[in-house]
């Protein structure tokens, strides 16, 4: 039986790297599209079983070459997303125009599935450019290609993320840590391996025409997440609620001086809304897409020792 041919966009990120390992171990033939093979190639090549991964360098604006790479593929998976806009990498281009283009090419080449990663908790966030662009991308896909699956995950975390790792890097040195909206924003953190399992089961079940909200096993506020990280680091830190006007000033300041700001004005808008299921769609729990979801505090203990002074020797038994 011929293995399924899967086309992946965004394979070098946290979710992409874990997913490549899973898909190739299942003997799927995977082609990853990257904009810079010299910068990303070594990352991608180390993730997959030999002979099951091809890497092609194509600009997402090169329509002719994009069309060619879709030929003879069964599934397209789009993992590309951004939190900050810069030049051509705008929310409009990345979250609406690109998914629309990939959906059109999936339809043109008669793919069996187009799996697209969006975001949880963006409905109703009308003042966020990020949220509006994500919603627009979802709507474009639904209009174009019936064989879609849209996944809307909450916070995805792991040792390879840019969230828990950044927070622990800051908590290691800062005795006082700022929180916004009193840290009440709710999340349902989902481990990257659980997210990969959802995608695996969707492929195996050949699911189509469905939007699924992807959540972890527990609801955690931003303050609770920070408290768990602080506990895992075995340090004492003071969490300081910041007034909104000062938070906005900080966000503007970070956007001005940093290439990749740790907080933007748009993210501050998002933090005023819970990252929770909307109730409009079924969740991974409703559809039994996971066998055994991982818990946040248990998983961060497996890598938080890297931010401790004594490193692995301070690692607690789990």
Image: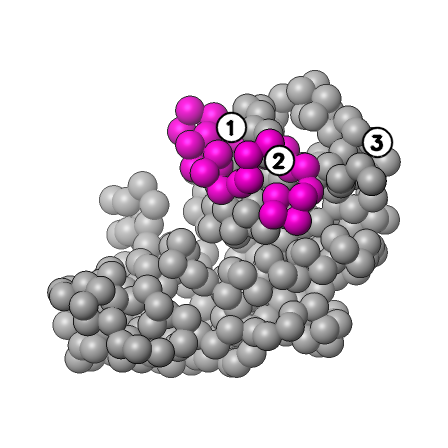
The foreground one among 64 and 165 is 165
Residue 171: quadrant of the picture: bottom left
Q: Residue furthest top?
A: 64
Number of other residues with Cα within 10 Å of mark 3, as a class: few under 14, some 14 to 19, many 20 or more: few
Considering only vertical position in the picture, is 151 above or below 145? below
Q: Nearer the viewer, residue 43 or 99?
A: 43
Using the image, tell me which numbered label, if any, was put on residue 52.
2
Residue 126, percent across and down? 59, 61
Q: CA distance from mark 2 to mark 1?
A: 20 Å
**Mark 1 lies on residue:** 35
Q: Position of residue 5 (x, y in %)?
A: 73, 37
**Is 88 on the left or on the right of 28, as rendered?**
left
Helix, strand or loop at disc 1? loop
Whether residue 123 is visible: no
Residue at image location 62% in from the left, 35% down from the top? 52
> Which residue is disc 3 drawn over?
108
The spot of residue 164 in percent (x, y) is 36, 63
- Position of 306 with respect to 214 (left or right) is left
**Does the magenta run of residues contain 86?**
no
Is residue 207 rendered to the left or right of residue 59? right
Which mark is in front, 2 or 3? 2
Specify start and end residues of the magenta stretch as a single range. 24-52
Residue 197, quarter of the rendered image? bottom right
């Amino acid at each position: 039986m011929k293995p399924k041919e899967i086309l992946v966009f965004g394979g070098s990120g946290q979710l992409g790297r874990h997913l490549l390992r899973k898909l190739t171990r299942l003997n799927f033939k995977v082609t990853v599209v990257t904009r810079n093979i010299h910068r990303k190639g070594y990352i991608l090549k180390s993730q997959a079983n030999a002979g099951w991964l091809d890497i092609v360098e194509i600009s997402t604006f090169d329509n002719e070459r994009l069309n060619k790479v879709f030929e003879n593929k069964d599934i397209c998976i789009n993992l590309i997303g951004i939190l900050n806009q810069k030049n051509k990498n705008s929310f409009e281009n990345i979250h609406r125009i690109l998914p629309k283009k990939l959906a059109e090419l999936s339809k043109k080449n008669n793919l069996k599935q187009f799996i697209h990663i969006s975001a949880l908790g963006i409905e109703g966030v009308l003042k966020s450019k990020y949220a509006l662009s994500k919603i627009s991308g979802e709507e474009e896909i639904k209009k174009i290609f019936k064989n879609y699956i849209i996944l809307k995950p909450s916070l995805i975390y792991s040792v390879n993320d840019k969230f828990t790792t950044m927070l622990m890097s800051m908590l290691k040195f800062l005795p006082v840590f700022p929180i916004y909206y009193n840290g009440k924003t709710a999340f349902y953190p989902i481990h990257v391996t659980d997210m990969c399992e959802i995608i695996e089961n969707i492929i195996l079940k050949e699911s189509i025409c469905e939007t699924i909200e992807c959540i972890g096993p527990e609801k955690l506020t931003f303050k609770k997440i920070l408290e768990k990280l602080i506990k895992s680091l075995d340090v004492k830190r003071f969490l300081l609620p910041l007034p909104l006007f000062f938070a906005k000033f900080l966000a503007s300041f970070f956007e001005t001086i940093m290439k990749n700001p740790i907080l933007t004005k748009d993210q501050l808008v998002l933090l005023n809304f819970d990252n929770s299921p909307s109730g409009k769609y079924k969740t991974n729990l409703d559809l039994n897409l996971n066998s055994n979801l991982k818990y946040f505090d248990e998983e961060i203990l497996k890598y938080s020792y890297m931010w401790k002074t004594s490193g692995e020797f301070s690692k607690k038994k789990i």
